[in-house]
Amino acid sequence: MWFRNLCVYQLADAFSIDAEQLEERLQPGVFHPVGGHDPESRGWVPPLGGDSEQLVHAASQCLMICLQTESRVLPPAVVREQVEQRISEREDAMGRPMGRREKARLKEEVTLDLLPRAFTKSRRAYAYIDPEGRWLVVDAATWREAELLTDDLRAMLGSLPVRPFQTDSSPAQVMTEWLARDRFPSDLEPGEEAVFEDPRSEGAEVRCKRQDLRSDEIRAHIRAGKRIRRLAIDWDGRINAMLDADLSVKRLRFSDLVQSDADDREAESAAERFDADFAIMTGELARFLPRLQAWFE
């Protein structure tokens, strides 16, 4: 299980929970398939999948959990077509135009009628708790996605004293200075991709791909007043990713060196392979996350 994105929360020192306690707290929120007239269902499922029944997967002192969401897919065009047809039929029968409230109620009726016949789609969001490092790490591309999981987890636990990364310096300003001065942390190298934004013009941005970010052409954007919003990074030859100014990490990829460590571990089952990958991933992130925080202090 290799995460592709990171939204990282810091756990309060007072927070403490073990695998058995977490398992017990999650049981009331176990996932159930979406009902015929429900638009969505959300609940906890075993991270290991397959025949596993454990909602908490513990390995290397870290606790992995998984939230599954099942939604009914009801295209707006289908609803609109049915609504328009029924409006026409009822207006002909009544001999007068329908009012706004009548049309709104009719739309609700149509939606309820169509939901049981709608297709469903499922998605899973994974996260793990690192009690020793005091991290809650969510595999989500945006903080909004991550909050769905943390909100549900908080509901199960009663309280969840966490906060997203907080730094003393502006990440956008720090990353811009790295590139402007060509002074990066000793264990960090820029990749070949960046997104610049102009703080003076909302929505204005420049995207650079497969470019030498140290070139004068790229630095001209900084001299023109633009700042970095996303920057491709290579950390210690072990992690490649896009670092966002909101301190989320996107398109996370572990290097061949890390992957070879995982391949060297012989696994006789899917569960053993899961444990091995989980242990290596959390071990790498346990080193990476403190560095990520330190870069912007």
Image (spheres, helix red, strand yellow):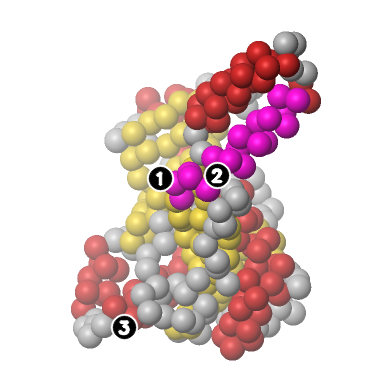
- Closest to the camera, between mark 3 and mark 2, is 2
Q: Nearer the viewer, residue 130 or 32?
A: 32
Q: In which quarter of the image is the N terminus?
A: bottom left
Please report the residue visible at 42 percent of the width from the left and 29 percent of the height from the top: 207
Question: Residue 162: x, y in percent?
Answer: 69, 66
Mark sitting earlier along the chain (3/1): 1
Q: Mark 2 points at which residue?
A: 115
Residue 12 coordinates in the image, percent (x, y): 71, 73
- Horizontal arrangement in the rendering, residue 75 relative to residue 284 (left or right): right
Circle 3: residue type: Glu
Q: Name the residue under label 3.
A: 272
**Residue type marked 1:** Ala
Highlighted range, magenta: 102-120
Magenta stretch, overall SS: helix
Residue 265, compared with residue 257, is above or below; it is below
Residue 112 covered by magenta stretch: yes
Residue drawn 36% across the image and 75% down it: 50
Rendered image: mark on residue 232: 1
* Residue 119 falls inside the magenta stretch: yes
